[in-house]
Amino acid sequence: MAKIKQVVKRTGAVVPFRKERITNAIYRAAVAVGGRDRSIAEGLANQVVAMLEEATQPDHIPTVEEIQDVVEKVLIENGHARTAKAYILYRDERARRRKERAERSAHPSENIPWHKIWEVLNWAMDHDVHTVERLNARIARGEFPQIVRETDRAYNEDITTASEMIRERRDSVKIVIIAGPSSSGKTTTTIKLSHLLTKMGLSLVPLTVDNYFFDLELHPKDEYGDYDFETPQALDLELINEHLVRLIAGEEVRIPFYDFKTGLRHDDRTPMRLGPGDIILIDSLHGLFADMTRSVDDELKFKLYIEPLLQMKGPDGRFVRWMDLRLMRRMVRDATHRAYKPQQTLEHWHYVRSSEMRNIIPYVNTTDYIVNSGLPYELPIMGARLFGHFEKWVEQYKDDPLRQDAFTRAERVYRLLKSVTPVEDDSAIPPDSLLREFIGGSCYEY
């Protein structure tokens, strides 16, 4: 019987074998179908390791694919058919994405809001911020304050358009959903939209779905102890649906309270009932996830999606990635408001992105309206705050096969920020700017 000490990743890199990775994969698949018993996942992982060691020759290092094959076998043989299905579907999905990237398919993605992007690109060209070079030139001419004003005006016009669309449907809409990936600016957008709708005579009642989190210890975590709380299954979707249906029917419900300090949920805490003409307002990372509001008819919902759809080319001729903008926003916000080090945010980001690709991005084009929260002026601001961190991380992670994702992202953002003229003075950014949600100094309470 061979004692397994290493595993070959798909990249060919040989890394230490960790049973915890198998446990986490099994538990994550179980959570996707409603399971919450980590001890079962640990027992199944032990079986996987035993089967691997029995079948592995002393001089053979198993591959990730070989290990996954054994996981499927153990799940099925132990009667965990639903968990096995979730695991197989996730594995197939990841394989399909790798194949698509390798083939560089020429087919346009159905998950990208092409029409909205064209509007944003047209605006960027009209305002001479469609490349980093042009942005730097405007900054050199002392036009940073003008860039801020022009950008914020476009963002606020987007929100005004959304509010007018909701007003037109005021007789049928019972729920307004504001959704988008992490650090897209949902909170500021929600506040601004709420103010506009209130002026129009609409009564909005916020439902904070974060209070529906399961206890933290029930979430999947990796071998570093990093919890994966980015998935919609981290929320009690059944209870959310029950409360939405009862609220729309005019009943009173008692909303739970989730204590982020202790990681515990306390049920039946806050009474809530809708009055005549009230509209439920949901600001949620996973607001577009079908199971979040599956019990409510679609005609009763207005769904708004927000994403920093910045259209700006870097020095390499490629467009700046939206996810990198959000990564930097979250780093600054977490460090300021949540005592979470920027390096921790970087190392956790693969969870964020994985969940987005599965549970957020596929629903982009199912929305009623899309708001662009991309701000050309955030790049020079972030450059002044974060460039030194990324420069350090590129060196730190370059030879670490276990942190390949962190290295790839760090290197890409480092090259981008290196090309941007940094701006230290943020006084030109008004207190109601969306960027203030992340860098501090906002006039809104978050």
Image (cartoon, grey):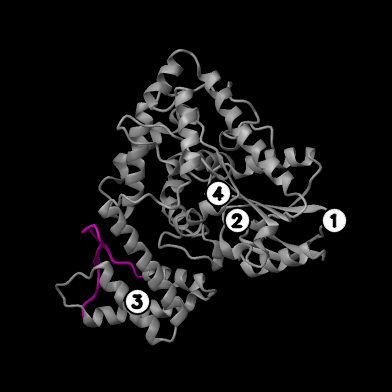
Q: Which mark is residue 287?
A: 2
Three-letter code, disc 2? Gly
**In the image, which is nearer the foreground, mark 3 or mark 4?**
4
Mark 1 → mark 3, Cα distance in angstroms: 51 Å
- Quarter of the image holding residue 292? bottom right
Q: Residue at x 42, y 80 (%)?
A: 43
Q: CA distance from mark 2 to mark 3?
A: 32 Å
In the displayed structure, 227 sits above or below 310; it is below
Looking at the image, tell me whether mark 3 or mark 4 is earlier in sequence order: 3
Quadrant of the frame with the N terminus: bottom left
Q: Is residue 92 left or right of residue 192?
A: left
Name the element at disc 1. Answer: loop
**Among numbered discs 1 and 4, the one appearing first in the sequence:** 4
Residue at the spot of label 3:
71
Amino acid type, residue under disc 4 in the picture? Gly
Residues marked 1 and 2 touching at CB (< 8 Å) = no
Secondary structure under badge 2? loop
- What residue does disc 4 label? 180
Range of magenta residues = 1-19
